[in-house]
């Protein structure tokens, strides 16, 4: 994951950094699994070409799969609210440096008089709950919809900035609690999640994924952190295998998120560190929620025996921003 910076309070700024795949050795402890996908860079390039949504909503589109959240979809999501109980899906910013939270990730400074403050986020990483913009990842020098990476400059993203989600996200959310499926409080780092795992969970939960949904994957990252302490998630976290992206596209999922970085790491694709991130963002045109805290959501869903909810989220609309910290809310 890469670095992005937002100052909220006395000043606001953004530092643009786009991510590219870097060499990564596949985990030796993992086999191909039930959903074997690409292993080499050439195989990955072929999958990217096959699955990308470039041109699907027009040559000038900058919203990607957010287009799947229609007015009817938002009304449908509102109809899921029966109790009016809300649950935050975002982790409180962490002031202390840790293996998963660099010193630069978050800073809160009070001004004289203690009635004005400055909040600094270096949010692309593993410590801050945030959403990625469509200009955050490139593949072979191109952003989503065939926009050249040169469209992004030191001034920000000329295309696909986070301001395109200024009106917010209101849609049906579905929790994929794979840790609960496996009967464990959390998955161990490096655990790959396959389509078969997701379908087994959906059958158990009695939920069907529909067009325009946002899916949240719970690996139990925060539960593991609470029990065992922080660890370096970069290159060492549970997440979905690249082969799952085909399933995601076939169901017209609008957004995807997790309590870590969505990708299993190591990635099992030689030469690409975050192949799922790259394929979803630069290929499908899908914004990704990273580092969401899904523990309270999982508890609420289990108590209600209900794994669908209305999801409401609003990024800070920084023009040309590569993403935004945010507080996403599930409403039951």
Image (cartoon, helix red, strand yellow):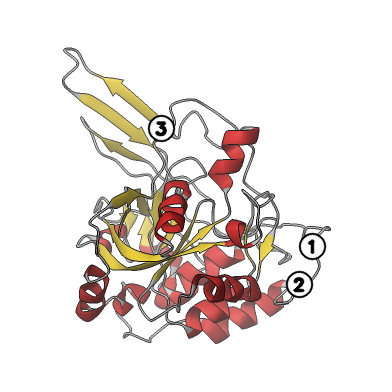
Name the residue rendered at 74%, 73% in the picture: 40
As drawn, the label of residue 321 is none
Can residue 101 be seen at all in this image of the molecule?
yes
Q: Distance between the residues labelled 1 and 3?
A: 34 Å
Cβ atoms at labels 2 and 1 below 8 Å apart:
yes
Give the residue number, with chain letter if any, for mark 2: 33
Give the residue number, with chain letter if any, for mark 3: 106
Can residue 326 be seen at all in this image of the molecule?
no
Front residue (pair 306, 16): 306
Give the residue number, with chain letter if any, for mark 1: 30
Left or right: residue 215 compared with residue 271: left
Residue 237 in the image, given as x and y percentages of width and height: 64, 51
User: Dot 1: few (<14), some (14–19), or many (≥20) neighbours within 10 Å?
Assistant: few
Q: How far apart are marks 3 and 2 (CA)?
A: 38 Å
**Looking at the image, is 96 positioned above or below residue 236?**
above
Look at the numbered disc 2 and give the secondary structure of its residue.
loop
The number of numbered badges drawn on the structure is 3
Name the residue rendered at 65%, 56% in the picture: 183
Left or right: residue 92 compared with residue 44: left
In the current view of this chain or complex, which residue is farthest to the right?
28
Name the residue rendered at 44%, 42% in the picture: 128
Circle nearer the N terminus (3, 2): 2
Left or right: residue 35 compared with residue 106: right
Name the residue rendered at 56%, 86% in the picture: 50
Front residue (pair 265, 271): 265
User: Dot 2: few (<14), some (14–19), or many (≥20) neighbours within 10 Å?
Assistant: few
User: Dot 3: few (<14), some (14–19), or many (≥20) neighbours within 10 Å?
Assistant: many
Question: Which is more foreground, mark 3 or mark 2?
Answer: 2
Left or right: residue 194 compared with residue 14: right
Residue 245 in the image, given as x and y percentages of width and height: 56, 75
């Amino acid at each position: 994951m890469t670095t992005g910076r937002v100052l909220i309070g006395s000043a606001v700024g953004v530092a643009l950094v786009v991510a590219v795949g870097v060499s990564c050795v596949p985990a030796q402890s993992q086999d191909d699994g039930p959903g074997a996908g690409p292993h080499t860079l050439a195989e990955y390039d072929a999958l990217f070409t096959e699955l990308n949504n470039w041109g699907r909503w027009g040559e000038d589109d900058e919203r990607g799969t957010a287009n799947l959240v229609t007015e009817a979809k938002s009304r449908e999501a509102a109809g899921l609210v029966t109790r009016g109980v809300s649950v935050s899906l975002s982790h409180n910013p962490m002031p202390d440096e840790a293996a998963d939270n660099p010193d630069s990730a978050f800073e809160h400074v009070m001004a004289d008089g203690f009635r004005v403050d400055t909040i600094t986020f270096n949010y692309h990483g593993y410590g801050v709950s945030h959403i990625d913009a469509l200009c955050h990842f490139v593949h072979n020098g191109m952003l989503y919809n065939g926009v050249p990476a040169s469209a992004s400059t030191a001034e920000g993203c000329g295309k696909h900035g986070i301001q395109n989600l200024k009106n917010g996200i209101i849609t049906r959310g579905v929790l994929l609690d794979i840790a609960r499926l496996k009967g464990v409080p959390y998955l161990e780092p490096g655990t790959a999640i396959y389509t078969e795992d997701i379908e087994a969970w959906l059958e158990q939960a009695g939920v069907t994924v529909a067009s325009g949904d946002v899916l949240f994957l719970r690996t139990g990252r925060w539960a593991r952190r609470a029990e065992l302490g922080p660890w370096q998630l970069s290159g060492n976290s549970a997440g979905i295998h690249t082969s799952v992206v085909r399933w995601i596209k076939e169901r017209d999922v609008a957004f995807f998120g997790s309590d870590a970085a969505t990708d299993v790491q190591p990635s099992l694709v030689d030469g690409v560190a975050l192949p799922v991130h790259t394929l979803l963002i630069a290929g499908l045109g899908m914004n990704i929620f990273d580092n969401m805290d899904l523990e309270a959501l999982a508890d609420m869903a289990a108590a209600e025996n209900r794994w669908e909810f209305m999801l409401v989220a609003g990024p800070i609309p920084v023009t040309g921003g590569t993403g935004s910290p945010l507080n996403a809310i599930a409403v039951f």
